[in-house]
Structures are given as C-alpha cells and as structure tokens.
Amino acid sequence: MTDRTAFYAGSFDPLTNGHLDVLKGALELADTVVIGIGIHPGKKPLFSYGERVALIERSAKDELGADGGRIKVVAFDNLVIDAARVHGASIMIRGLRDGTDLDYEMQMAGMNQTMAPELLTVFLPASPSVRTVTATLVRQIASMGGNVAPFVPAVVAAALKEKFSA
C-alpha cells in the first residue's frame, strides 16, 4: 500500500492550538501531512513565510514529538487543489470550528470536487477547548499586550511577544 498524504492549507499567521488540534487529527488519517502556507502578494502577514515555517516546525517538534517528523511545510500561491496535486496528496484537510466554517467549507469542497475529483476533502472538527481560537483574535490580543499563552504553542507566544515589543 502506498503512503497516504494529506494537504492542510492555511495562512497560519500565527499557528494556533486550533491548527495543532486539526493537525493531530490529520496525522491519524495520513502518513504524511503537507502544511501549505498560502502566499498572497496583496496581503501583509504579521510573520514572514520563513518565520511561519520555523514556528510550525518547532511547534510540531515540541507538541507532537515523533509525529512532528511526519509533516512537511511548503508555500503555495496557486489553487489549493493544484498545490495538493504537486505534493502528491489524496486528501485535503479542513478544520471546522462552527456552522459558519461548515457553510463556507462545503461550498469550497463542492468547487474543489468538481475541479479535482481525485482529491477527498476531509473535515475535522476542532476540539471544544480550541473552537473559539482564531489567528485573528490571537494577533489582536497580542498586539494589545494580552496573554496569548492559552491559545498558541509556547514558541509562538514568545514570537508574538517579541514581535509586539519591538
């Protein structure tokens, strides 16, 4: 049997405990999870692509132990289905926090299925303890000097503190 690869796309700006929760579920389904960081030329992320890669890789090592070695972090600036294909994925992972996410993700899954019927979209619901966590809220809290430690891995909390104290 061949290895099963999943593609988990997002901006991960920054990586949150919600992202890690979904990543843990993805690792239950696939041998390898490719984390695709979407690059959008018109957007100015808080963390550069390189910083996000480093934060994801360090968090995976710290939080996932040996399973952290089963992830690969890449950039993409095209359609997610094309990026998934390039990296040999047969599964696309999408995390869900609530019904609003589900409505949006169902539309995307339908469009993606039409364009790439060989790719299976798998929805993974976030655990109750992380359902309210969003990268946007984390950035807002951090920018105002708040404690983001409950919402992000320790290495990300430290990077946010450094970013906003500069």
Image: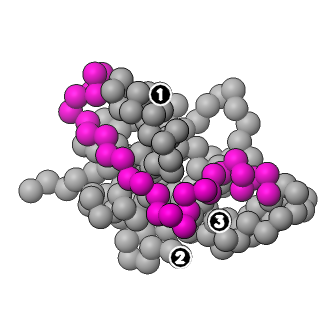
Q: Is residue 67 above or below residue 130?
A: below
Quadrant in the picture for the N terminus: bottom left
SS at mark 1?
loop
Graded by Cα atoms within 10 Å as few (under 14), some (14 to 19) or many (20 or more), the crowding at tag 2 reads some
Graded by Cα atoms within 10 Å as few (under 14), some (14 to 19) or many (20 or more), the crowding at tag 1 reads few
Residue topped by disc 1 = 78
Name the one closer to the observer, 146 or 58: 146
Question: Decide: marks 3, 1 in contact (CB < 8 A)?
Answer: no
SS at mark 3?
loop
Residue topped by disc 2 = 62
**What is the distance, in whole Å, between disc 2 and disc 1 at their CAs?**
30 Å
The three-letter amino acid code for the residue at tag 2 is Asp
Q: Earlier in the sequence, mark 2 or mark 3?
A: 2
Going by the image, does 86 lie left or right of 19?
left
Q: Does the magenta stretch include residue 99?
A: no
SS at mark 2?
helix
Q: Earlier in the sequence, mark 2 or mark 1?
A: 2
Residue 151, numbered label: 3
Q: Earlier in the sequence, mark 3 or mark 1?
A: 1
Instruction: Magenta stretch: give its range.
Output: 113-141
